Image (cartoon, helix red, strand yellow):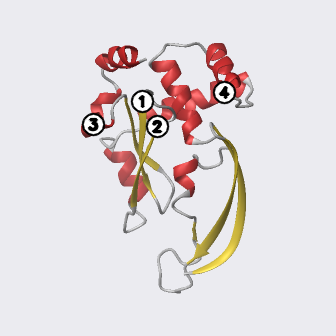
Amino acid sequence: MRIRYENRRTLVTLAGTVRLRLKIRRCEAAGCARHRAPYRPEAEAAWALPQHEFGLDVVALIGALRHCEHRSVPEIHTALRGRGVTVAERTVSNLLDRSDELLATVLTDAPRLKGLLAGQGRVVLALDGLQPDVGHEVLWVVRDCLTGSVLWRAASCRAARMTSPACSARPSRRRACQSRA
């Protein structure tokens, strides 16, 4: 596959503003099912969700502050501003919604996955783990690299708990998060 064009993307992360230069490839084989479909770099989705300007580390921190520390949106906004992340309070609400959507996405949703992946004929999976800060929960995301769709998301206070997809919804997780804080 040849590089067909480049995109630039600016993201706000906990470490500061990051500018990504993405090389977009396209399959030129006429018989290919993904003929002329763009292939975006796999690493892009490890930084942020599609069409979002805030990094996954910011989304993970917002989810951790809300669900582990039970903070309100204004408190989360203040915490982010204290870390040097320039963000509006309304954006915090939107990112909290994205975090909740990721939390609700599970592998057992067979009809959704079947419909999403049926036309591709193949699946290329990527597993990304991200811990916004030491002591905060780890955000695990499984994505389909061909479509960029998030197939599964789990948040756990310890990386070892990743083996159980149910760990993101157990009430005991709340106690574990509070004891580590």
Residue at position x 51%, y 55% from top? 148
Identified by mark 2, the residue type is: Gln
Identified by mark 3, the residue type is: Ala
Q: Residues within 10 Å of mark 2 (few under 14, many from 20)?
A: many
Which badge, 3 or 2, comes first in the chain's sequence? 2
**Decide: marks 3, 4 in contact (CB < 8 A)?**
no
Residue under label 1: 137
114 horizontally vs 50: left or right: left
Q: Residues within 10 Å of mark 4 (few under 14, many from 20)?
A: few
Residue at position x 71%, y 63% from top? 7
Q: Which mark is residue 131?
A: 2
Quadrant location, the C terminus: top left
- Distance from Cα at disc 2 to Cα at disc 4: 16 Å
Describe the element under mark 3 as helix, strand or loop.
Answer: helix
Q: Quadrant of residue 15?
A: top right
Q: Which mark is residue 83?
A: 4
Identified by mark 4, the residue type is: Arg
- Distance from Cα at disc 3 to Cα at disc 1: 11 Å
Residue 2 in picture, x, y percent from top left: 59, 82
Residue 120 in picture, x, y percent from top left: 42, 66
Which badge, 1 or 4, comes first in the chain's sequence? 4
Identified by mark 1, the residue type is: Glu
Residue 118 in picture, x, y percent from top left: 38, 61
Say if 168 sits above or below 19 in the image.
above
Which badge, 3 or 1, comes first in the chain's sequence? 1
Q: Quadrant of residue 160?
A: top left
Number of numbered discs visible in the structure rendering? 4
Residue under label 3: 160
Residue at position x 30%, y 21% from top? 170
- Distance from Cα at disc 3 to Cα at disc 4: 28 Å
2 horizontally vs 91: left or right: left
